[in-house]
Amino acid sequence: MKRSWKLVALMLFVLIFVCGGNLLSLERQDSRGDPIKNESIFAQSIAQNPGCDWPSFGRTPDNNRVAPDGCGPKTDNLINIWEFGANGSVKYPVILDDKIYFGSSNGEFYCVDCIFGKKIWEYRADGKISSPSIIIDDKIYFGSEEGKFYCLDIKKGEKRWEYKVDGIIYAPNALNGRIYVRTNKGEIHCLDAQTGSFIWSYSMGSFTSYPALLEDKLYFCSYKESIFYCYCINSNTGKVIWEYQKEMEEQPYATAVVISNEKIYFGLGYYTLGLLYCLDIQTGEEKWSFRADSEILNSPIVSNGKVYFSSMHKTYCVYEKTGAKKWEIDVYNGSSYAIALSESNLFLASMDGVQCLRISDGQKKWSYKSLFHPNYVLISSKRIYVVSENIVCCFGDFNKTNQPASNTCDWLSYGRTPDNNRVVPDGCAPKNNSLVEIWKISTGSHPLAIATENKIYISLYDFIYCLDDKNGRVIWEYKCSKSVSSYMAIKNGRLYFDIRMSSKQHVFCCLDAQVGRKIWEYEIPDYTYDCISPIATDDGVYFGTSNGKIYCLSPQTGKLKWEYNTGGEINYMPAIADGKLYAASSNNLYCLDLKTGKKLWKYETYYITSSPVVCGEKIYVGSSYGSRFYCFDTRQRKVIWTIKINIPSDFSPVVYKGMVYVGSTDRFYCLNSSNGSTIWSYNTHDLSSIISSPILSAGRIYFANKIKIYSLDSKKGLKLWEYEIANASSLSISNGKLYINSITELERILYCFSDSPPMPPKGTCCDNCTDCNKCMAFKIGSKDWFICNQLQTPMSTAPIIKNGRTFLVIRYIAETIGANVDWNATSQTVTITDPKNGKTIQLQINNNIATIGGKKVQIDQNTDVKPFISEGRTLLPLRFVVDSLGLDLDWLDQTKEAIICYKDPMCP
């Protein structure tokens, strides 16, 4: 008998082993008996155990925003690694596989590389995106305020499907192959995550909070007719399992629901009232509640028997079992919507900046205050990501390989990086040999463009300006007490520069680069004629003065850390590398310890007239007095080689992969870095001295003389292009743009050049364009537009697609054909009058009915197609206006371009 049982057990084991694959592949069924199609085990695992990724608002379906051990920063010495600027305010990013995804208020959804902060792709949705997104498998999901819920391919940003609801879509959550979508009308829709097909919906009240999911249950809060509810419903059927009720006269704000240890937690707030609740997950019975000093705005975090949360003015820690308070700390959180926890650190974004608290007692470990009203924080792969208005910022541990200046497109000082070597990473410079002027602006005496993500900073006499790099428009301006007298430097969201108070008195200033607010200033105690351009690092701000002194100030406070007197003149910016500062003072080259300012050594040579450039263990300097150029060994403290060359004053070379690029009065040279021998030289043939230090990027070398800008092939010295601009004293490159500073007796101008946008495609009316037969070309999402293949001044607002139709600012078309456009702010109407054909068209904002020649007509069979205002600009439906004016329209769906053809009726 025992043998027979063993035999049966063995046979069962073999049967399961052989048939296991088929048994595991059986389709699961929902409560209606329908199969759940294409459900992915990986989709479930990534949501419930995402490792260091952060694939949803709550990180996991239970919304407990705790990053696993090892996912947060290792130290408290953090730096701002990169910043990415969107075209609208950003809400709630998510992260997967070193890529961060987020939407913006202008309808653009971004995928950005987490390592360098560079855009990988973007997708334009209909309407503002104000809700979090969520990642499942190879797809990402998000909603818009136009009531559309999108599913995109996560690698390419291409749309897989969309789902339409009546109302604004709020944050989704997902589990087990299903995705749950909330609306502002109190509805929850359950969809198939693969196909977007509808499964069920449930209407709760005036709003629903961000839901939490566990197994086959969905938990969320709602409010209806003076009653606050917390629900537990079956996530497969939408049927209520239990509900918790609380009478409340006013509708409160409810945080996301959080699940932990058979309990659910959520916070409430309205006016000055703030309550944290703990309910039993099985019955909905209230276990305890805690009254805070004011509104609770962010969802709680539960970890190791404690609950952490914030009100408007405080951050709390209470015990999970009883709700008794362990500690509280004063923090003005303002509009902070989320906190995050990693190991022993609690991170929060508040009106006081980004802060890190010690979870044992709530004491502040560090803070970063340079961001303007940060309101969201998350943790992934040893970095912290913070949202501040339209900026996404990445913070990480400070180390040599984490330095943002060398591996990003930022141009942070006169020499771009602390070592002054102007080598720009591939992808940061313009890609083509055909460049066009994008914009220009008047500047001051030190007009070099300092650039970070999507912003540049310039001075104009006693003003500092922060500009949008797309169009040169002013983001903010700062009025200084006197004229700015040095180039600027930027680091960790702070801008540094010198102000000349009188002929020999100077004040060194620090501004918040986000908003243009003064943080501190330092009055230079000694009389000096000039203050030299600064270099900023995480530990200090360094600059020299013409009286021979070098100063190091604290970036945080502006207090003096050390100073060193060389006894000579310092007229050129120093260089920093490997914990040392190198400075040229008269006919001496100095090496100082960066932390203490103590002299390590000095070397006497000809009077140096350039900023040192450091590459490895070598330093390169030039002297226009001795017409010499030196290569110096920092270890042996001796000259390796020198050549006789008429190097311009204040000229610094570029050193890269065994080659040194340097200019003279009439030639540009590429030298062998080992011995100084000439590899190639280029003669400009215009008898003009080279005046700007060069830039190297992607195999191109850029420089300027007094007449032209040149771009050469860096390996062969062949000319790629030239552009005539007088006295281009300095160049800088950032984010695909070349900035050129021209200083003449009459004016000082900063030019911005970029790649010429692609011409309209062949095979359209643009091929045979004349004054009588005009062609206009527009592209969705681009402000560039053409008339007869000629690029025009960028549009104020790019064309967009909304409700399946193309909208744009119509005056660009109207002015091209000689029509008039009038706006009536009182009636919110646009009137287009074409005197050549006698047509008058009138459209009204948010109205599907227009008037043509006094007769009312419907704009589109889709009644949602109506004129609207976006960012202060009126956008009209293109197809309707073009047809009404008698123009021809070709729509190129593959490239999302509109080609408009116009024949002037006044022509024969």
Image (spheres, rainbow, N blue to C red):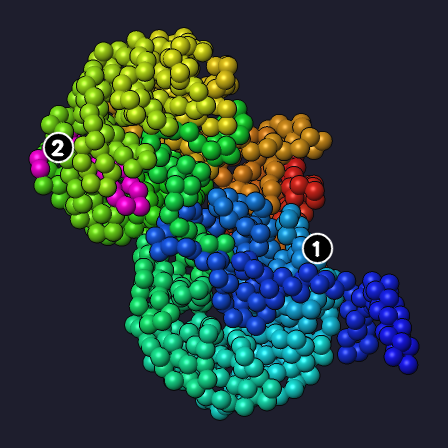
Tell me the residue that label 2 is attached to: 565
Residue 536: in magenta span: yes
Residue 120 place in picture, x, y as percent: 57, 45
Label 2 Cα crowd, 10 Å radius (few <14 / some 14-19 / many 20+)? some
Q: Is residue 115 left or right of residue 886?
A: left
Residue 310 visible to the viewer: yes
Please state which of residues 737 and 347 is positioned toward the viewer in this rendering: 347
Q: Secondary structure at mark 1?
A: strand
Q: Quadrant of residue 564?
A: top left
Depth check, mark 2 against mark 1: the one in front is 2
Label 1 Cα crowd, 10 Å radius (few <14 / some 14-19 / many 20+)? some
Task: Please state which amino acid type lies under the numbered disc 2.
Answer: Asn
Compared with 893, 642 (above or below) is above
Q: Is residue 354 left or right of residue 754?
A: left
Task: Please state which amino acid type lies under the numbered disc 1.
Answer: Arg
Tell me the residue that label 1 is attached to: 160
Quarter of the figure that contains the N terminus = bottom right
Residue drawn at 50 percent across, 80 percent down: 265
Q: Which residues are magenta?
A: 526-546
